[in-house]
Image (cartoon, grey):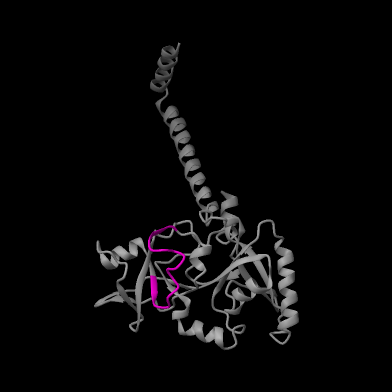
Amino acid sequence: MIRNYIKIALRNLRKNPVYSFINIFGLASGLACFILILIFVQHELSYDRFHKNSDQLYRVIQRRPDSKGADHWAATSPALASTLKKELSEVTSATSVFPTFNPLISLGDKRFTEEGILADTNFLKIFTFPFLQGDAATALESPNSIVLTASFARKIFGEQNPIGQTLTYQNQQPHIVTGIMADVPETSHLAFSYILPALSDQYYRDCITREPWYNNGLYTYVVLASGVDTHRVEEKMRAYIDRNLADWRPEDRMAFLFQPLRDIHLKSQHLKTFPFEKGGSQRYVYLF
């Protein structure tokens, strides 16, 4: 029976070659497009889901009223992370992150301008980037430490063991390699080749000691307890500002909002963000 079907199909192909080609080519093209679209959509929807407890991770953004309604910023102040952890029982952990604006790393005469980030000691406890060498829990404790991705470590040291080696940041700060992590996954909204301790940066030290609420130059991430209502947490933070920071931009009526980590890649077009963040478009994903 199957042999007869094959013979009939081959006979029709020979009898109507143009018509057969159009049908087969159209079907193949349609299937190929469908597969490519499916891969694209799956890729866009998978951002930042590789972290443990990614459903409890949030980025704190700020909303300021303006003449057009409201202006939204992803950058926040250095005082925010510690305040959230101290004042809100719903926040189990918090961390601060900001980019290296002059990303010069050197080893002797070798110079590299890869993009990196500065982060506090909680960063590698909240974000579970895979570690290959060193201890993620302590890798950023020393202000003179540095954590490299595997590909950046190979670019600098080749096949040598990088742990314990000294690199120079911005031609003046020595940093000892304390950890090697796997390359940042493509599906991470944060893209970087190395991590430096936030306390090694003079701007950060100045911000946390002098008017820490007035300088907005870093990202703040938090872990919320399971089942927490983010709107309630936002209201509690607003009440804290009214009680303790009534003279801080009273004309702004600034509010802090909690953006789910999994939403950052596709739902941040309205935010003013740092250049190291990779953004997508929820509109295109829905369209496809």
Image quarter of the N terminus:
top left
Residue 206 lies, in percent from the top left, at 52, 87
Determine the residue positioned at 40% across, 15% down. 7
- In magenta, the rendered stretch is 130-146
Determine the residue positioned at 56% across, 48% down. 288
**Front in this rendered view, residue 271 or 215:** 215
Marks counted in the figure total: 0
> Is 143 part of what is drawn in magenta?
yes
Determine the residue positioned at 59% across, 59% down. 263
Q: In the picture, residue 132 is in which quadrant?
A: bottom left
Residue 244 lies, in percent from the top left, at 72, 82
Residue 254 lies, in percent from the top left, at 70, 77
Residue 226 lies, in percent from the top left, at 66, 57
> Is 135 part of what is drawn in magenta?
yes
Using residue 212 as the reference point, say whether residue 3 is left or right of it: left
Residue 270 visible at all: no
Q: Main secondary structure of the magenta part?
A: loop
**Front in this rendered view, residue 77 or 134:** 134
Using residue 209 as the reference point, say whether residue 169 is left or right of it: left
Q: In the picture, residue 67 is in which quadrant?
A: bottom right
Using residue 282 as the reference point, say whether residue 191 is left or right of it: left
Q: In the picture, residue 259 is in which quadrant?
A: bottom right
Residue 228 visible at all: yes
Determine the residue positioned at 68% across, 73% down. 87
Vertical arrangement, residue 145 with respect to residue 183, above or below: below
